[in-house]
């Protein structure tokens, strides 16, 4: 058998030598884009936000340049229900599991393509029983009509990667694998951010519902007083009708809030990988969330290395670069090397006997000559796709910087908005109390009292929304900076 396989081994050696001595890689070599030459995100640096004492979520926030982002950034809100919900979502969310499977697909495609670096060896065995016609020359030298033939055979084929077609193909698949890895990181960040934002939105809705309940109680009490005064002749029917209208308007705001709360709970259930009917016990309140007071702000040069969407765009650029090499290599010659070795005895016991063996070596080369410009236009299309990918990368980088800048501006203004909302609520509350006293003493019309109630109602709702905005935009900052996925053990680094 060694005598049979010897030519095949010689062939493999010659093919390997040919690969090492003649191979080159056509097409451009990929170069990583340079980091943007900017030093900040906003025209004027944002370092601190204002504070609002004695108000939930009113703490001042300090931005720390260059500080790393923790992998579990949501834990900075110091809410155990939120921590548990995010952990549950990261284990059960189907989108995340799908992204993990997509990464495995891309990785296996790379490994499969790398197999073309090596010769393809196949082994086979055939056994036949036949009879030749008497009027024809006998098939065998033994001059017999009935015979058996046993043929074990080893075949080796190899396509040397002379111009780098396979290496560029592997490079493009490797870029797609990296795209899948960064897509997994993006899914991870989006999921955790959506869970946190849904929890904050639920807390905001509960705050607005509580405020609306308070307003309904206030207006209901006022209506009782007016009806009593009307019965005694101290209030007009117009005053009672106006208060009834006011109460009806406040009550009408409750169903939309309850609908939004129910839908938010449905969203949270689905994000956590469950059905809406599988409700969970935890309820989110603004008073149970702690506003992070130190916020990391990555250096601009680091942002392009942290944002998964930017990294995906970069790998898309890498893929487009490799595809130019693939298009160029397809226009160049292709070499095929094959070898076969085996034996064909009529007696299975003589399968490895001398004299029954056979072997052959073959080499071929093909060169595209005329294809109506197909390959030339495909190369031009690949070059244009690279230009497109480069512009898409630049656009993605600009959007990433815009996201961070928008969030920093929002946090700065959120703090001022909360301070103004708290002051407006306090002022509206004082105005309402004074208006009640003056109305009770007969120094104020009921319409003026009604106006004070409406102002207090709006101020109360505005305060709850301003509180929720600070929490939501804080979560958005972590997402805009990349979410710390590189510090997570469940997201592959390479």
Image: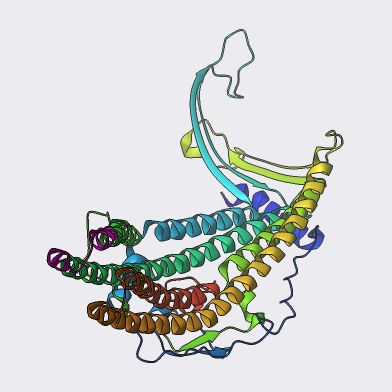
Q: Position of residue 191 (x, y in %)?
A: 42, 65
Q: Is residue 74 left or right of residue 112?
A: left
Quarter containing the C terminus: bottom right
- Can you see residue 442? yes
- The prevailing secondary structure element of the residues shown in magenta is helix
Q: Is residue 212 left or right of residue 353?
A: left
Q: Is residue 14 left or right of residue 262?
A: right
**Range shown magenta:** 227-245
Q: Nearer the viewer, residue 402 or 22?
A: 402
Q: Specify the quadrant of the image occupied by residue 139.
A: top right
What residue lies at 48% left-to-right and 56% top-to-bottom? 102
Q: Is residue 325 left or right of residue 191?
A: right
Q: Specify the quadrant of the image occupied by residue 468.
A: bottom left
**54 up-or-down from 157: above or below:** below
**220 up-or-down from 350: above or below:** below
What residue lies at 23% left-to-right and 71% top-to-bottom? 218
What residue lies at 59% left-to-right and 65% top-to-bottom? 309
Q: Position of residue 229 (x, y in %)?
A: 16, 68
Q: Is residue 33 magenta?
A: no
**346 up-or-down from 446: above or below:** above
Return the residue found at the far top: 135
What color scheme is it?
Answer: rainbow
Q: Nearer the viewer, residue 108 or 266?
A: 266
Return the residue found at the far right: 369
Q: Is residue 241 magenta?
A: yes
């Amino acid at each position: 058998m060694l005598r049979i396989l010897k030519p095949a081994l010689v062939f493999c050696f010659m093919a390997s030598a040919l690969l090492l001595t003649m191979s080159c890689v056509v097409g451009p070599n990929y170069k990583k884009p340079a980091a943007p030459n900017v030093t900040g995100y906003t025209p004027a640096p944002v370092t601190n936000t204002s504070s609002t004492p004695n108000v939930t979520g009113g703490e001042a926030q300090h931005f720390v340049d260059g500080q790393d982002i923790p992998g579990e950034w949501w834990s900075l809100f110091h809410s155990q229900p939120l921590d548990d919900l995010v952990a549950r979502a990261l284990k059960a969310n189907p989108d995340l599991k799908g992204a993990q499977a997509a990464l495995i697909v891309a990785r296996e495609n790379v490994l499969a393509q790398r197999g073309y670096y090596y010769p393809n060896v196949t082994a086979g065995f055939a056994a036949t029983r036949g009879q030749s016609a008497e009027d024809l020359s006998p098939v065998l030298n033994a001059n017999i009509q009935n015979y058996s033939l046993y043929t074990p055979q080893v075949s080796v084929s190899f396509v040397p990667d002379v111009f780098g077609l396979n290496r560029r193909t592997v490079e493009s698949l490797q870029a797609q694998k990296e795209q899948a890895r960064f897509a997994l990181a993006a899914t991870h960040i989006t999921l955790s951010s959506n869970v946190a934002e849904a929890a904050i939105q639920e807390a905001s809705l509960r705050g607005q519902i509580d405020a609306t309940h308070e307003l309904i109680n206030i207006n209901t009490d006022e209506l009782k007083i007016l009806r009593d005064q009307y019965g005694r002749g101290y209030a007009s029917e117009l005053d009672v009708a106006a208060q009834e209208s006011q109460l009806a308007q406040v009550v009408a705001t409750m169903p939309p809030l309850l609908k939004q709360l129910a839908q938010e709970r449905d969203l949270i259930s689905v994000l956590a990988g469950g059905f809406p009917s599988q409700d969970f016990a935890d309820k989110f309140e603004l008073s149970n969330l702690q506003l992070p007071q130190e916020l990391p702000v990555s250096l601009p040069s680091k942002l392009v290395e942290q944002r998964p969407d930017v990294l995906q765009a970069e790998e898309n650029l890498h893929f487009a670069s490799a595809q130019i090499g693939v298009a160029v290599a397809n226009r160049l010659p292709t070499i095929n090397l094959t070898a076969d070795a085996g034996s064909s005895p009529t007696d299975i016991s003589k399968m490895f006997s001398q004299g029954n063996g056979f072997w052959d070596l073959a080499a071929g080369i093909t060169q595209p000559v005329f294809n109506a410009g197909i390959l030339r236009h495909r190369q031009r299309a690949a070059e244009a796709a690279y230009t497109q990918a480069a512009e898409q990368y630049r656009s993605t980088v600009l959007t990433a910087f815009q996201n961070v800048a928008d969030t920093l501006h929002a946090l700065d203004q959120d703090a001022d908005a909360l301070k103004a909302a708290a002051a407006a609520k306090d002022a509206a509350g004082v105005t309402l109390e004074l208006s009640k006293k003056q109305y009770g003493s007969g120094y104020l019309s009921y319409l003026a009292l009604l106006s004070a109630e409406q102002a207090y109602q709006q101020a109360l709702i505005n305060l709850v929304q301003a509180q929720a905005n600070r929490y939501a935009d804080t979560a958005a900052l972590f997402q805009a900076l990349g979410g710390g996925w590189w510090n997570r053990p469940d997201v592959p680094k390479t």
